[in-house]
Image (cartoon, rainbow, N blue to C red):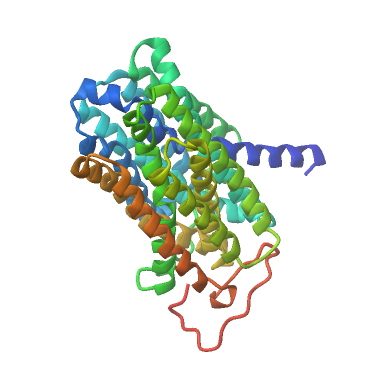
Amino acid sequence: MPLAESRLRRLGGWALLIALGLNLRPIISSISPLLMEIRGATGMSFQSSAWLTSLPVVCMGLVALLGVRLEARLGERRGVALGLLMILCACLARLLCDQASALLATALLGGAGVALIQALVPALIKRQFQQRVALAMGIYSASLMGGGGLAALLSPHVATHFAHWQAGLGVWLLPALAALLLWWLLPFAGPGQRLNAPSISLWRNRRAWLLALYFGLINCGYMSMVAWLPAYYLQLGWSATQSGSLLAFMTIFQVIAALLMPALAQRQSDRRPLLAISLSAQALGFSGLVLWPLQAPQLWVALIGFGLGACFALSLILTLDHRRDPREAGQLAAFVQGVGFLINAVSPWMTGWLRELTGSFISAWWVLILTVLAMLVLTRVFSPSSYRESQSTTLAPQPIPTGSTSTSA
């Protein structure tokens, strides 16, 4: 292959990775800054409107658990294309519909599309960027979070410009359309590629369940922030634009962490020190929201964003570390994300329920603080020597501990 063509393919691969990531969160994060307008137009309560955030995450979990079968049936190229098409259709429906039931249906449709893409991307990364898995995962995570922040920031402005909240939700069909066109022009996988290698069994695998629990709980704060951080500051007297910009500010630090921490992880095989730093940042940030929400909101949100951005990328890298083969690594990542996102789905619903029960978001922030501290303690079990199969950033295997069994991941 000529050098120029090879470079073009590499650049195309990175561009696709970014384009895919940018489309995976607007379906969720565009809701929160416009929540008051949506509730006023549809009559939804705090608890019922939380389903607009929770339902996509439920879909992410359920579809990810079916990821292996979907991958075998559709292939990567068709699977990712279908996911982007579902996101596009969900955004189009939001542009045209203004009833609560229709919005909930778009949450299901868009969430299924996001889930389908998320289930396929880790294996793509493991295969396509073999020597730069941590860096590629960081760029993918940063793009994913950047898309969420852009939606939180721009959706209120678009809604104001067109004098209707539906425009702020529907505008995100444009990046989905752009990504779909780019995917068909420069696909990662070959035309019609289907991977029919045998799948690995994870349902009775204790390490797989532990990774899934860990992934779900260290990342559940993101869904609560996306769903309720603007509403929290609206309750404290901020405007919709101000509160949406605060969520976008959080995203800046998510992106920084998603790029910085995997780059640091590229230099070492033990993920625990970086995970401990990231979880500590989350705990400090949530504590600030409870104790001094108006004194230094940007600081607390920056800490939360940094911790969440790092935890998402590092927890996926930790998962991929457990399997050398890209196919098996993708299956493990799909399982971990599937169970983890089902756990994530409870977080915004729980926050909305506690808000209605107590009249304040403070109790929900305390629950997140305790959860993060518990996961900080759990982090110590993920030593590289505990992996049955491990892939460091240089593709060198880690030692297998004596007495390990076939049930280890």
**Left of 102 or right of it: where is 294?**
right
Residue 22 is at least partly visible in this image: no
Compared with 370, 401 (above or below) is below
Residue 215, quarter of picture: bottom left
Find residue 194 and report its horizontal and vertical position in percent: 49, 52
Compared with 18, 369 (above or below) is below
Residue occupying the point 70% across, 64% down? 394
348 or 67, nearer to the observer: 348
Residue occupying the point 54% across, 55% down? 278
View extreme (bottom): residue: 403
Compared with 286, 148 (above or below) is above
Residue occupying the point 80% across, 37% down? 4
Residue 373, quarter of picture: bottom left
Residue occupying the point 69% across, 57% down? 131
Find residue 84 and report its horizontal and vertical position in percent: 44, 35
Find residue 151 and report its horizontal and vertical position in percent: 46, 29
